[in-house]
Amino acid sequence: MTSEVVIDVQQKEISIALLEDKNLVEYQSEPRQASFSVGNIYVAKVKKLMPGLNASFVDVGYERDAFLHYLDLGNQFDSYTKYLKQVQSDRKKLYPFAKAAKQPDLKKDGSVQTTLTLGQEVLVQIVKEPISTKGPRLTCDLSFAGRFLILIPFNDKVSVSSKIKSGEERARLKQLIRSIKPKNCGVIVRTVAEGKRVAELDAELKTLTKYWEDTIVKVQKTQKRPQLVFEETSRAVALLRDLFNPTYENIYVNDEDVFKEVQNYVSLIAPDKVDIVKLYTGKTPIFDNFNITKQIKSSFGKTVNYKHGAYMIIEHTEALHVVDVNSGNRTRSEKGQEANALDVNLGAADELARQLRLRDMGGIIVVDFIDMKLAEDRQMLYERMCKNMQKDRARHNILPLSKFGLMQITRQRVRPAMDINVEETCPTCFGKGKVRSSILFTDQLEGKIDNLVNKIGIKKFYLHVHPYVAAYINQGVLSLKRKWQMKYGFGLHIVASQKMAFLQYEFYDAKKEFIDMKEEIETK
């Protein structure tokens, strides 16, 4: 199996796609300025105590207050509280972390009323992003994750991933980490650290320690509350940190700054693999070039088609995701209805495992498969689903089919599910249902080009249009494109983009930044 990562950096958003054998299996897209990422650390203020829930609501600057349960305060809450006061007591000289006194563990059966006070400042880390009507979910048990190690301040334990089975290797890693870890810090050794040299682990541990030291410096020097004091790495690097493995063949990036950022990161964690990071400079949009745009449009939406005419309907409610499997207009199997139902269900299990990763669906997922009478067929379907989900990084649990033929799945949810609406409002009529005559579309485009060149003064630009329209503009020796270039200059470039609707267009300048030339009045 070959794996490739494609990163599309636009002016307002960044999108990351993971391909396995050219098939899209993971996709993330978010605004460039997105905040409240999982892993961010804030100095925040307790806004409200909820004794009935044994929890509190904390102001981290989001429109809805974040939720902090008593059990999420962590064993070392008192140690953090005391050290936070010591750091803030002197704005000029930083109290050394190595001298910080570790306090007794917080009682597990305690009360939020006796532990927190209104207006109290606390160091918190986001563990779940805002989802639907809920604010972020917080913890006071801070951690800094790297590729091989996780650093936990005020925790002296060294733990090794249970997936490392060799007793000799576990002992080696524990002894090694104990000899290099800083005072007052605990470390979790991740699975990928198996077999790694001391130099690699030491370099990452120093980087994570620097993150914690920089966080404390920011706490000391800033007085505004709430205040972001540690920001997770960029989405591109964060995804690579969790996903990266030696089987990657290529990582394509279409932005020079992000390319350097990714290249630097890969050179740190896998110096021999730095050549797989490549800067994409083609004129065709990067997602179109790797057939990702088409896969996105066919994979998202309420109805998802898979092999031989069968399809699934995926719906999201406040409480759970519901999936209905249908055989559609599929040709019936010669072996009978039972064999046909099994074949459709096995195909649905393959596609559903991909959809869960692709949409990052979390919480409770209930799947209504086609009814099967034979117990061995139901067991085969359950085993197929379990096998398909082994590639999924998110924690999950799958139950066998119930008496009603329903399969229940729970999957870790840390951010909102990717819900891309592929049925967009028509960009040429703005939902009114009427557009100007199609024959006048190229005249409209020429008017925009004239305005751009002669009034605004932009000489070099890219016009993105639907591939059919691009083919019409480029058609022939004396094409429309050639006529426009003779009239307005050779800085005009036509780009066929699969993202565009039939009569949609977008202008970009020489730096690939979007130029808004669209007016609703032009469709009347």
Image (tube, helix red, strand yellow):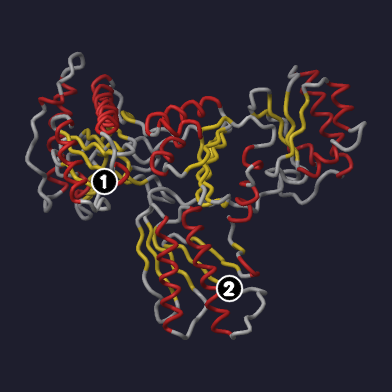
Residue at 19%, 23% (x, y): give it.
88
The residue tagged 1 is 68
Label 2, secondary structure: give it: strand
Viewer-side residue, 193 vs 208: 193
The C terminus sits in image quarter: top right
Q: Residue furthest top?
A: 92
Q: Which mark is residue 407?
A: none
**Amino acid found under the numbered disc labelled 1:** Leu
The residue tagged 2 is 326
Q: For the residue carrying disc 1, how many other residues have a C-alpha within 10 Å: few (<14), some (14-19), or many (20+)? A: many
Q: Percent x, y for residue 110?
A: 11, 50
Q: How many marks?
A: 2
Q: Is residue 177 left or right of residue 295?
A: left
Residue at 83%, 29% (x, y): give it.
447
Viewer-side residue, 312 vs 45: 312
**Amino acid found under the numbered disc labelled 2:** Asn
